[in-house]
Amino acid sequence: MKALITGGGGFAGRRLQALLEAAGYAVRSTALKADPENDIKGMDMTVPDLVERTIAEEEPDVIFHLAAQSSVAVSWKEPQLTAQVNVIGTINLLEAVKKNRSKAAVLLIGSGEEYGYFPEGACPLEESVSLHPGNIYAATKVCQEMLGEIYHRSFGLNTIMVRAFNHSGPGQSDTFVISAFCRQIAEIELGIKAPEISVGNLAAKRDFTDVRDIVRAYRLLAEKGVPGEVYNVGRGKAVSIQSVLDTVLGLCGMTVTVKPDPSRMRASDIPVIEPDVSKIYSCTGWRAEISLEQTIADTLDWWRSELSKRK
């Protein structure tokens, strides 16, 4: 089996490539900039000719479409870029698959943010719940999913749509909340910054899953998922950002002041997002196995090691 991972140089992409190679897949990864050292091919998703040429040359059996502008915070600041990468990039990929008459399974990675402002009492969220995205990133992912459904229905493409909820783990950018907390604590421990941690909205509740579990779900869905269907991927249990912070602080042996930071607040924030994950379990048998506490501990240890190298 040959797999193509768009966005393969990213946080989840690197984990997915390692998982697939261990399972015997031949893997080609792409990123915006080529990385010959890690055998990553350069491909700008917004340039249709490049995308079409890559599909023609690689002839993959399965495509994992991870390439995206994936930060909600960045989407508020750079909405045009977010739409260009997430929507136009997806169109370019689907058109390339269509033009090459490829029968590849195409896993389109969306987000739990797509649900947005859902009716009271709707949690845990089933895939059939109406989508009312509450931010620009989420809106682009809803559009991506709709495009996947259209290309499946109209052209017979084997698209499988995923709504992946928050995932974290060692090596993640500190633009995401768990990694942001862990980096700040590691900086405090190493004397890089004062014993003060900046936080955003601590009341919001989110579903967090370890990236190592998430990519395992991607592989199973590519192998067993039904084309044209949508699957939630997450732990199935939302926790408050406050509880995440408490866990991080509990791993630090110092007294730390918590300081609200307006720059970390979003223009619009959904109070709670929690998925129903019975559909993916029924289809593949997948469920999250790594505890949130373990994910946080591993992320903090990664930042401790990484920052120690930089001192």
Image: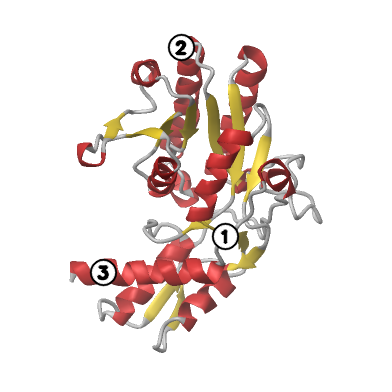
> What residue would you read off at disc 1?
208
Q: Is 113 located above or below residue 149 in the figure?
A: below
Identify the amino acid type marked 1.
Phe
Question: Is residue 117 shown above or below 200?
Answer: above
Assign a secondary structure to mark 3.
Answer: helix
160 lies left or right of 297:
right
Of the image marks 1 and 2, the number of the one nearer the N terminus:
2
Instruction: Please tell me whether residue 90 is drawn above or below residue 280 in the rendered image.
Output: above
Q: Residue at x 34, y 75 (%)?
A: 186
Q: Is residue 203 left or right of residue 74?
A: right
Q: Secondary structure at mark 2?
A: loop
Q: List x then y, in percent, for residue 296.
A: 47, 69
Q: Residue furthest right?
A: 121
Using a 10 Å C-alpha cutoff, classify the residue at mark 2 as few (fewer than 14 neighbours), some (14 to 19) or many (20 or more): some
For the C terminus, the quadrant is bottom left
Q: Position of residue 304 (x, y in %)?
A: 31, 72
* Whole-number angstrom distance, CA of label 1 to CA of label 2: 37 Å
First-in-chain label (3 vs 2) = 2
Q: Quadrant of residue 239?
A: bottom right
Give the side of residue 111 with respect to residue 79, left or right: right
**Residue drawn at x 41%, y 66% as measured from the top left:** 299
Q: CB under 8 Å between callouts 3 and 1?
A: no
Q: Quadrant of residue 189?
A: bottom left
> Could you give the CA–CA distance between mark 3 and mark 1, rounded to whole angstroms?
24 Å
Q: State the mark number for residue 100.
A: 2
The amino acid sitting under disc 2 is: Asn
Q: Disc 3 or 1, which lies upstream in sequence?
A: 1
Instruction: Check disc 3: other Cα within 10 Å, few if <14, some if 14-19, many if 20+.
Output: some
Residue annotated with mark 3: 307
Q: Nearer the viewer, residue 278 or 175?
A: 278
